[in-house]
Image (cartoon, helix red, strand yellow):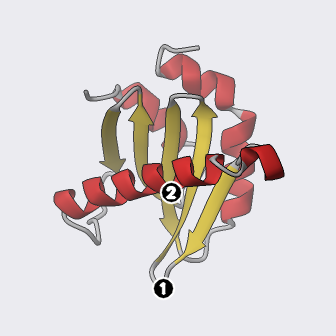
Amino acid sequence: MKFSLDFYNFIFKISSQIRFIGIYHHDHLDGQMKWGLESYMTKEETKKSLQNALRRWNERKELSSKLGSPVYTMTVYKLVKRATIELSDKTLILISTDIDADIEQIVKKLLGNKEKILEKLEIR
């Protein structure tokens, strides 16, 4: 399943430092690199990375009875920063940013636009 360019454009406009958007929605994986940028990973590596993020998210949810539900996670790599954010029970978004990005601020903007993002996916 491919998601609309309108969906991706809406998220890319949140910050010019977003490099990649990955989405897991109702058992479908999709992703989009920012136009004009090269990915550091192959398509296969990207798909595996998205699957691993989903697996780790589900593992975190197992602790929700003790810690509360996870809201987002962040990882800093040498070349990029990444965040995984739950938009709904069946929807996760993963973003990669430039290494110097204020990823917490970007995550806050994404969470603040959660309803609009879900509308772009045409889900509730």
Residue 5 vertical position relative to residue 108 in the rendered view, above or below: above
Instruction: Tell me the distance, in whole angstroms, between the alpha carbons under discs 1 and 2.
Output: 21 Å
Q: Is residue 14 visible?
A: no
Check disc 1: other Cα within 10 Å, few if <14, some if 14-19, many if 20+: few
Check disc 2: other Cα within 10 Å, few if <14, some if 14-19, many if 20+: few
**Residue 4 placement (x, y as % from top left):** 35, 25
Residue in the picture at 52% in, 15% down: 123
**Residue 95 placement (x, y as % from top left):** 50, 54
Residue 12 vertical position relative to residue 113 in the rendered view, above or below: below
Kindly identify which residue carries mark 1: 78
Labelled pair 1, 2 in contact (Cβ < 8 Å):
no
Q: Amino acid at mark 2?
A: Arg
Q: Determine the residue located farthest toward the bottom in the rendered image.
A: 78
Quarter occupied by residue 65? top right
Residue 5 vertical position relative to residue 83 in the rendered view, above or below: above
Residue 89 vertical position relative to residue 111 in the rendered view, above or below: above
Query: Is disc 1 placed on a helix, strand or loop?
Result: loop
Q: Which mark is residue 56?
A: 2
Q: Which mark is residue 91?
A: none
**Residue 15 placement (x, y as % from top left):** 59, 52
Query: Is disc 2 placed on a helix, strand or loop?
Result: helix
Q: Amino acid at mark 1?
A: Lys
**Residue 112 placement (x, y as % from top left):** 75, 36
Residue in the picture at 71% in, 46% down: 71
Q: Is residue 117 visible?
A: yes
